[in-house]
Amino acid sequence: MEDCLAKKMEITVSEAEKRTGRNAMNIQETYTAYLIETRAVESQTEGQCAPVESLWRRYSEFELLRNYLSVTYPHIVVPPLPEKRADFVWHKLSADNMDPDFVERRRIGLENFLLRVASHPVLCQDKIFYAFLMQEGGWKEMVNETGFHLKADSRLKALNATFRVKNPDKRFTELKHYSDELQSVISHLLRVRARVADRLYGVYKVHGNYGRVFSEWSAIEKEMGDGLQSAGHHMDVYAASIDDILEEEEHYADQLKEYLFYAEALRAVCRKHELMQYDLEMAAQDLTSKKQQCEELATGTVRTFSLKGMTSKLFGQETPEQREAKIKVLEEQIQEGEEQLKSKNLEGRDFVKSAWADIERFKEQKNHDLKEALISYAVMQISMCKKGIQVWTNAKECFSKM
Amino acid sequence: TSLTEVNSFSPSVPISPSSMINQYKFEDGPELRDLFITVDDPESHITAIETFITYRVVTKTTRGEFDSSEYEVRRRYQDFHWLKSKLEEAHPTLIIPPLPEKFIMKGMVERFSDEFIETRRKALHKFLNRIADHPTLTFNEDFKIFLTAQAWELSSHKKQGPGLLSRMGQTVRAVASSVRGAVRNRPEMFTEMSNYMETFSQKINLLDKIAHRIYKEERDYCNELKEYGPIHTLWSASEEDTAESLKGIASCIDRCCRATEKRMAGLSEHLLPILHEYVLYSEILMGVLKRRDQIQGELDSKVDALANKKTEKDLFLEEIGKLEDKVERASNALKADWDRWKQNMQWDMRSAFTNVAENNLRYYEE
């Protein structure tokens, strides 16, 4: 992370605000805007704080930025955005986009996205990205002017390439399998985690009923009354503790979700490779067939069946002049084709090299992040158990005084 | 609290000196018990008409009035039910321990499933032991016969005693007197008890439901954990660097699952049966209070009759005197037993919930 933007500048997404406005179709809509604050790090001398610059962006602008980056740097595993809609919800969470908890988690996700881009050795140098952070007005036009839309490959083309490519680099095929597996295992994990959270919530909350009944019961008891009452209080504490515990777990889930979406980014790089490879194979095939045609015309032998051959047999041969002209055209095309093939080959090799470098970087990042996430999850569980021990030790004391 | 209070409230309970001594012994602790009963070994019997289960009842005793020191008999649920009715007849205002129910309404438990049989066996064991621990009931003659008689002896003994008709007569009178409305001269103490019982019954039923609900939620949680763990193992197969950590988490989740199962077992072995027993107890206690009221009702009506009839005064007075005694005895017996019951209840609840707390501690420590 040598000369990354992240080192030179503090970036935060500090606030979220509900807004109403008119959209492209002139229809009134409500959306959330996020405040991006940046502050240069270098110019911070002792006691002197650099000024904070800020501007507001909405989610669709983040999306535009990411699309631009994906198209412009197809060999990079571009960091994913937090989810558009709340997924993997469990009972208590709402699936509403306007829900304050959802907005809060999205704010954190967006900040994370910006930090990831800013720490990427290649992406952080992009001018559009810089403008996204610094220039409020006219940014959208700037992006559109780059004409990146035109560079984008159609999904159909990509799909076609996936099925028809003959010799893709083995590493990319493996990587694609890996990203499929990663996606399926993480989404399964998140689904079950949501169910586990639901059940755990149930266990804790029902204990709250104990608190209520104990308290009511203690009213009619003389000797047992105090013990019951205080035990009931601890049951209430126990039941309430689950809310904080599960909120923390949501952050863990979000960390996993990021890598779920990263799997899609990985697949995108693989697809690009397949596309380029397919293009290459098609160009090579085209070249070979043209060369063959040329040879046939020159030598007059028909090696392969062709409609042209048949028609000329039926309707008479062409004149030598016509043949000469054809050969000339083909020879030109062949030369063009060979040059194109050479450059495509070069492009392909460059792509593979730079893509693979980024993939290695990504792998290291992923291993590091996942390990940290798993450790923090374990720490969360331990803290949950410690709380449980405390509550039940207190409760036990109360019970023994009954 | 125990001993002195019991004795001060029941001055006219006819206790024989020997049973007084025994009473002391019981309250002091199980080491001084002289009657040990176990209920085990359920066996199923299939006849042409029906299928039923018998349980083995083993009694060990050092008491003089028993001919031998060890007995082993086989009893079925019907026999326990008979014993309970006889005890209720003989001591209408004492608190007879609850029997497990005849059928289970909710839940898909089949009549002869292993779980059902085991739960019932434990409850029957508790039933007999509670009777054995009771200062008065333990010397009941029918109880002794229940523990010692061979099957045919028991059947022939059962056939004796007030017939069906007279028992029906008692029930009719009981219904009639309860229809007559609330008792007028009920001592304050019993009204308090009645109010207490109403609230207690409500609360204990709620606790029973809550405990069952917790059990169910824990079971569902455990089931989800069973799916949650293996996913991590699956994931570790695709990873290199993080594989170890993932496998570690998977094994921790498995341990959580097993710890949860232990917690559930603790609930079902200790808390749930006790809560259930006290749910039944609350019904029994309400019944006992009613019966005391009935007896008092009889007394009151006779007193009223006396006020109206000037003749045959002496006869009436004698009857009234007897009834007054009866009422007093019944009330005292009830009061004594009540105190004892409350103590036991306290102790039971305390130990049950402490047990739950300990189980939870163990769970979290694991």
Image (tube, coloured by chain):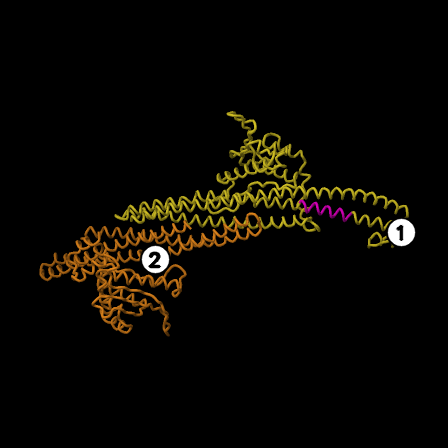
- Label ID, residue B273: 2
Q: Residue B112 in the image: x percent, y percent?
A: 39, 66
Q: Which amino acid, mark 2?
A: Pro
**Residue at left offset 46%, top offset 54%:** B223
Residue A392: tell me if it is visible.
Answer: yes
Depth check, mark 2 against mark 1: the one in front is 2
Please give the residue where the numbered disc 1 appears in the rendered image. Answer: A317
Task: Based on the picture, tell me whether residue B207 belongs to the magenta stretch.
Answer: no
**Residue at left offset 28%, top offset 53%:** B347
Say which quarter of the image contains residue A38. top right
Q: Please state the extent of the stretch shown in magenta in the rendering.
A: A272-286
Q: Colour of chain B?
A: orange
Please give the letter of the chain rendered in yellow: A
Q: Out of A147 and B22, give the one closest to the viewer.
A: B22
Q: Residue B351 in the image: x percent, y percent?
A: 31, 53
Q: Out of A270 and B292, give the one closest to the viewer.
A: A270
